[in-house]
Amino acid sequence: MKVISAIAPLICSVSVVFAGGCASPLSASVDTAKYSRMSCSELNVAMGDAAADISRTAVNRGKVAQTNIPTWLWGGQRVAAAVTARQSARIEQLQQQEAAIAAARRSRC
């Protein structure tokens, strides 16, 4: 019984760390109208921000995918797979956003 009570906080903390990536909702579409109103310098900044977000998300996805999850942690692999899938979806959405910015920049600058 002491072993279970000692392991329970560890299981909860690991679950919270892996599920933390699921807290923010993703929008499915990219609003291209807002990019048509931006100046060239604002588009450049937005492009840099999108690229930085893609890199940051990819690094985090790699860290989660490479995490050694103990076999006794029930559902740990499933949580890691869900977080990785969610981060992959976020990267795809950011790439669509970056493509929309690039198209607006090509047409205006």
Image (cartoon, grey):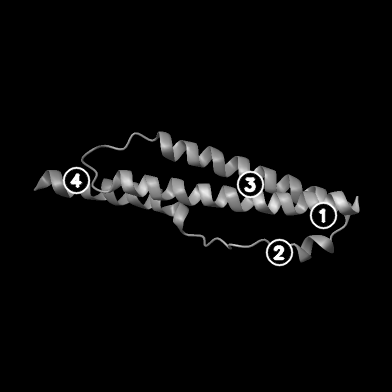
Residue 104, label in figure: 1
Q: Are marks 4 and 2 in contact (CB under 8 Å)?
A: no
Q: Amino acid at mark 1?
A: Ala
- Mark in front: 2 vs 3: 2
Q: Between disc 2 and disc 3, whose residue precedes?
A: 2
Label 2: how many residues lie within 10 Å, few (<14), some (14-19) or many (20+)?
A: few
Left/right of residue 17 with respect to residue 46 in the rendered view: left
SS for callout 2: loop
Q: How far apart are the alpha carbons under marks 2 and 1?
A: 12 Å
Q: CA distance from mark 2 to mark 3?
A: 17 Å
Residue 93 in the image, given as x and y percentages of width and height:
60, 53
Q: Is residue 21 left or right of residue 108?
A: left
Verify CB contact (< 8 Å) between mark 2 and mark 3: no
In contact (CB < 8 Å): disc 3 and disc 1: no
Q: CA distance from mark 3 to mark 1?
A: 19 Å
The residue beneath circle 4 is 6
Element class at badge 4? helix
Alpha carbon of mark 3 to alpha carbon of mark 4: how far?
Answer: 37 Å
- Distance (Cα) linking label 4 and label 2: 49 Å
Q: Position of residue 65 (x, y in %)?
A: 42, 38
Give the SS element for disc 3: helix
Do residues under tags 1 and 4 come within 8 Å of each other at their CB atoms? no
Place of residue 102 in the rendered image (x, y in percent of width and height, measured from the top left): 78, 49
Q: Under tag 1, what secondary structure? A: helix
Q: Tell which tag, 3 or 1, sits nearer the viewer.
A: 1
Q: Which mark is residue 31?
A: 2
Where is residue 52? Give x, y as percent. Answer: 67, 43
